[in-house]
Image (tube, rainbow, N blue to C red):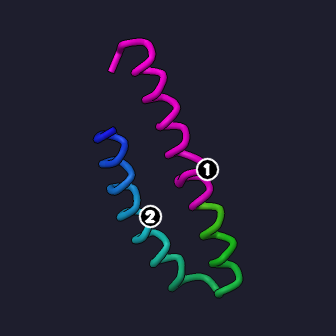
Amino acid sequence: MVILHTVSELLGVRLKRVLDAAALALPPEQFLRYRRIVLDEFGRRGLLKDLEREFGNLDRHGKG
């Protein structure tokens, strides 16, 4: 799916910027926890997984 791939790439760029800023502001141990939470929420276990499911639902119901 082209749209999902594009969203994933755009999200990755922004996540990198957020994580880079957090790495500068947090002690290493706290940063690792923060990174894990952010990636779980917005990555393959979170938002991207939700988007894949929703786009799949649209395709199945002929609304895509």
What percent of the width, then of the height, locates residue 26?
61, 82
| Image quadrant in which the N terminus is located | top left
Quadrant of the image occupied by residue 58: top left
What percent of the width, then of the height, locates residue 64?
33, 21
Q: Name the residue carrying label 1.
A: 45
Relative to 54, does residue 13 appear above or below in the rendering? Answer: below
* Residue 24 on the magenta segment: no
Disc marking residue 15:
2
**Kind of residue at badge 2:** Leu
**Kind of residue at badge 1:** Arg
Could you say which is closer to the camera, residue 56 or residue 39? 56
Residue for point 65% across, 87% down: 27
Residue for point 46% across, 77% down: 21
State which region is magenta: 39-64
Q: Main secondary structure of the magenta part?
A: helix
Q: Nearer the viewer, mark 1 or mark 2?
A: 1
Which element carries disc 2, helix, strand or loop?
A: helix
Left or right, 3 with respect to 54, comes to: left
Residue for point 59% across, 47% down: 46
Residue for point 60% across, 70% down: 35
Left or right, 13 with respect to 41, comes to: left
* Residue 60 on the magenta segment: yes
Q: How crowded is mark 1: few (under 14 residues within 10 Å), some or many (20 or more)?
A: few
Mark found first going from the N terminus, 1 or 2: 2
Are the residues at dot 1 and dot 2 in contact (C-beta closer than 8 Å)?
no
